[in-house]
Image (tube, rainbow, N blue to C red):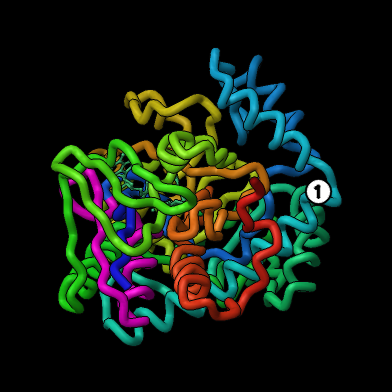
């Protein structure tokens, strides 16, 4: 079958690879001049089934409300005159109860575990290099109360067959000596020994090359403007360069997926949640973190990527702007300095901001649309790098009319 993948982020390129493996003729289209230039460019890099908790939890509304007065909150809400934003907030709030949070976390963890296995399979079959690490991730805590609560909360991941080890301060530092200079700030940690990390930008670029070698056509610098339909089929897409048709189409446009879908009266509950990253040079590899993790009370993620350390923070529900200024990174950098000052060069940070394509549940939508030959694979939120390869295999199985290996509860398009 001729299949057109709309979007060359990590989700689109991973989907292209699985579709090529199934023998399809694949074309990928993106308005950017290469793969992974948008949200897949500068994320935290954590491949983190051990952090697959739903963001829509009973504590989220309180944080969002407080953020209106005090911006120093993990989830920040900036109200806009936007119907899309308020409709999304309404749906998000509906998920903010203990029962939904537990269900969404369980489903997310299953997809993440499967997806990490698929990532490993893709890496084994392609040999792509992406500054990958597979020594686990450390989620550390500064206060006993937060640590105890985290130990209790982790049971849901254990119930979903994920190993989570509880480490005291000494065990944490023994696991990652890069945390030794910060030991007095740490009470204990949760170690997800099977979690990993890597640069999703490098991965996507390398996988796109493998796709091209396998016959995939990439059309960059081509904006998708419109979709033409006849009955319940998509007949073509109209781009800045003309009209293109295929047997089937896969929607992987991240935060822009709802815009194209709306033209077809398909309502996708996806809204951007902005985050910031700073990438720093590691000056002393011996003293730098050896594996990635999260400073949980500061909600600061850190991830060694070769000779760089990536830091990320903040979840801002504030519309589509990806702009930033140096002061947006001040809090992140001062917190990181207190941890890694001796190992990292804080003088030449590379700044970036990106938009997580969030659904209210945190689960992506992987499904056939109401149009027979239009498939949806989008809305992977804060875990799109982790979920991309599993979502890609599920999508390819659906196209092939095979039963996917993971249940898609909560991932269906609900017309
Ligand atoms: C700060 C931050 C930290 C994160 N940390 C992690 C993490 O540690 N682990 C993890 O698993 N995930 C993480 N994520 C989430 C992850 O980065 C995203 O879920 C993932 O990159 C989404 O990929 P995507 O391919 O769906 O979207 P994108 O990468 O945005 O790709 C969509 C593509 O569609 C193209 N496009 C859009 N509209 C059009 C159009 N009209 N015509 C043509 N092309 C178009 C864009 O150019 C883009 O290339 C993080 C995200 C952020 C912002």
Q: Please give left or right for residue 60 compared with residue 278 in the image.
A: right
Q: Which residues are magenta?
A: 9-36
- Residue 150 visible, this orientation: yes
Q: Residue at x 38, y 75 (%)?
A: 18
Callout 1 crowding tier (Cα within 10 Å): few <14, some 14–19, many ≥20 = few
Side of 383 relative to 191 (left or right):
left
Q: Could you say which quadrant of the image residue 309 lies in?
A: bottom left
* Front position in the image: 368 or 47: 368
Residue 373 place in picture, x, y as percent = 44, 60
Give x and y (percent) for residue 301. Answer: 50, 50
On screen, residue 388 versus residue 202, left or right, reads: right
Pinpoint residue 154: horizontal percent, then vertical percent: 75, 63
**Quadrant in the picture for the N terminus:** bottom left
Q: Residue at x 17, y 75 (%)?
A: 215
Above-or-below relation of 64 to 275: above
Q: Is residue 13 magenta?
A: yes
User: In front: 245, or 144?
Assistant: 245
Rendered residue at 54%/18% (across/down): 82
Q: Can the viewer see residue 341?
A: no
**Secondary structure category for the residue under label 1:** helix
Above or below — where is 402 with respect to 303?
below
Which residue in the protein does label 1 denote? 145
Number of dots carrying numbers: 1
Quarter of the image for residue 267 reads: top right
């Amino acid at each position: 079958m001729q299949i057109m993948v709309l979007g060359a982020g990590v989700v689109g390129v991973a989907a292209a690879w699985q579709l090529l493996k199934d023998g399809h003729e694949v074309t990928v289209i993106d308005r950017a001049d290469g793969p992974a230039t948008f949200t897949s460019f500068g994320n935290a890099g954590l491949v983190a089934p051990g952090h697959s908790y739903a963001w829509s939890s009973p504590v989220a509304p309180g944080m969002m409300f407080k953020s209106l007065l005090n911006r120093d909150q993990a989830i920040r809400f900036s109200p806009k005159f936007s119907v899309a934003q308020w409709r999304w907030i309404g749906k998000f709030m509906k998920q903010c109860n203990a029962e939904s949070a537990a269900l969404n976390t369980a489903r997310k963890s299953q997809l993440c575990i499967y997806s990490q296995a698929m990532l490993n399979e893709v890496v084994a079959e392609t040999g792509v290099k992406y500054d990958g690490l597979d020594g686990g991730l450390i989620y550390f805590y500064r206060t006993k109360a937060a640590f105890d609560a985290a130990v209790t909360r982790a049971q849901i991941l254990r119930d979903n067959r994920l190993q989570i080890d509880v480490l005291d301060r000494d065990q944490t530092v023994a696991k990652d000596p890069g945390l030794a200079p910060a030991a007095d700030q740490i009470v204990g940690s949760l170690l997800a020994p099977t979690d990993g990390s890597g640069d999703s930008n490098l991965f996507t670029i390398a996988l796109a090359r493998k796709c091209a070698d396998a016959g995939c056509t990439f059309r960059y610098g081509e904006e998708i403007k419109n979709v033409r339909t006849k009955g319940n089929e998509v007949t073509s897409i109209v781009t800045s360069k003309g009209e293109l048709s295929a047997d089937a189409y896969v929607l992987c446009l991240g935060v822009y997926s709802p815009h194209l879908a709306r033209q077809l009266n398909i309502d996708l509950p996806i809204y951007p949640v902005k985050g910031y990253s700073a990438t720093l040079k590691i000056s002393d590899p011996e003293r730098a973190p050896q594996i990635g993790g999260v400073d949980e009370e500061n909600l600061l993620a850190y991830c060694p990527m070769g000779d760089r350390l990536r830091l990320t923070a903040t979840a801002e529900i504030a519309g589509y702007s990806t702009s930033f200024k140096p002061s947006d990174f001040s809090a992140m950098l001062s917190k990181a300095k207190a941890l890694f000052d001796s190992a990292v060069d804080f003088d030449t940070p590379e700044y970036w901001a990106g938009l997580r394509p969030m659904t209210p549940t945190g689960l992506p939508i992987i499904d056939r649309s109401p149009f027979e030959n239009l498939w949806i694979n989008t809305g992977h939120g804060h875990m799109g790098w982790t979920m991309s390869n599993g979502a890609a295999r599920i999508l390819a199985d659906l196209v092939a009319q095979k039963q996917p290996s993971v249940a898609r509860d909560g991932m269906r398009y609900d017309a």
